Image: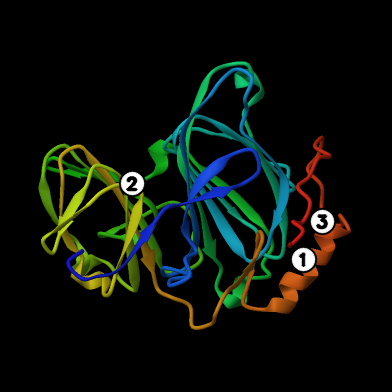
Amino acid sequence: MSNIQLIIEERAADIGNFMVGRLLPFRKKRMVGPFIYIDHMGPVKLNERQNFDVLPHPHIGLSTLTFLFEGSIMHRDTLGNEVEIKPGAVNWMTAGKGIVHSERTPEYLRESELFMHGLQIWVALPKHLEQMEPEFYHIEEEGIPAWSDGDVDFKLVAGEALGRKSSVPVYSKLFMIEIKSKSEQVVSIGDQLYGESGLYILEGSIKSGGHEYGPKQILVAKDSTLCEFTISANSTIYIFGGEAFPEERFIDWNFVSSDKALIEEAKQKWKEQTFDKIEGDDEYIPYPTRR
């Protein structure tokens, strides 16, 4: 990352009964490629009286990517899916014209101590697919491409890069790569990247341009093709990005679109509770009132 353009620090954000570290969007950088929203959840220990409960809420115009390092989340949605997300798996839900989902601690763990740690990511859809039919895919850890180069371990969480393609069915040119290193190593992969790129340091550190950078920040590159850095021993990082869209994207609460009218329509639909319902779950998060 010898050409760092911007450093984005995690900012605390409240998503209901759970605090997260917000990374994107940022006032100086709303998107990196098609990635429009990144939250770092935890790490946090939940005791037997606490649970992770994100009540039913809607989305339009995006795909969500949930990737856990620790813990477990039960995903339910209005397509009828009920899937437990475990560490290493990729939960990929495409909202398109509209979907509602909830994320909760599974029933069998609700009276147990539980560590929660992971990333929740939104990827904006191309303009011509913003109103597509909603879809859902769950890819277990063994279905994600993983390989090693000496002491450096790679995993292609989503997209296409480094001569490989993930089985996650993305809808634009993008990549999300996990890199773990057991020892200090030089990583030079820029000639295999494209578009815009950001580097998120989960643990450990990297060195670039005479500076050392630690956890809980994104380094945004001026040019992804110049991506080279030294990763420290026992470090874990994520490189993500891809080709940027030509149109601006707008965000209002859980809604993303290139068309503000579609967001207004979704807002009204949620206020009137005319979105589809999750079977057996009548709770919901109201549209937030603005002060």
Dot 3: element: loop
Q: Quadrant of the C terminus?
A: bottom right
Snapshot colouring: rainbow
> Dot 3, how many residues are within 10 Å of its Cα: few (below 14), some (14-19), or many (20+)?
some
Q: CA distance from mark 3 to mark 1?
A: 9 Å
Q: Nearer the viewer, mark 1 or mark 2?
A: 1
> Dot 1, how many residues are within 10 Å of its Cα: few (below 14), some (14-19), or many (20+)?
many
Q: Residue at x 30, y 71 (%)?
A: 194
* Amino acid type assigned to the residue bearing label 1 in the image: Ala
Q: CA distance from mark 3 to mark 2?
A: 36 Å
Report the disc number at residue 266.
Answer: 1
- Return the residue found at the far bottom: 246
Q: Nearer the N terminus, badge 1 or badge 2?
A: 2
Q: CA distance from mark 1 to mark 2?
A: 36 Å
Report the disc number at residue 145.
Answer: 2
Dot 2: element: loop
Q: Nearer the N terminus, badge 3 or badge 2?
A: 2
Q: Quadrant of the N terminus?
A: bottom left
Q: Nearer the viewer, residue 218 or 274?
A: 218
The residue where tag 3 is placed is 275
Q: Quadrant of residue 244?
A: bottom left
Q: Residue at x 38, y 65 (%)?
A: 241
How far from the left and from the top, in percent, is residue 171?
Answer: 51, 65
Q: How many marks?
A: 3
- C-beta proximity under 8 Å, tags 3 and 1: no
How far from the left and from the top, in percent, is residue 98?
Answer: 72, 60
Q: Nearer the viewer, mark 3 or mark 2?
A: 3
Report the disc number at residue 7.
Answer: none
Relative to 103, is 95 above or below? below
Relative to 150, is 172 above or below? below
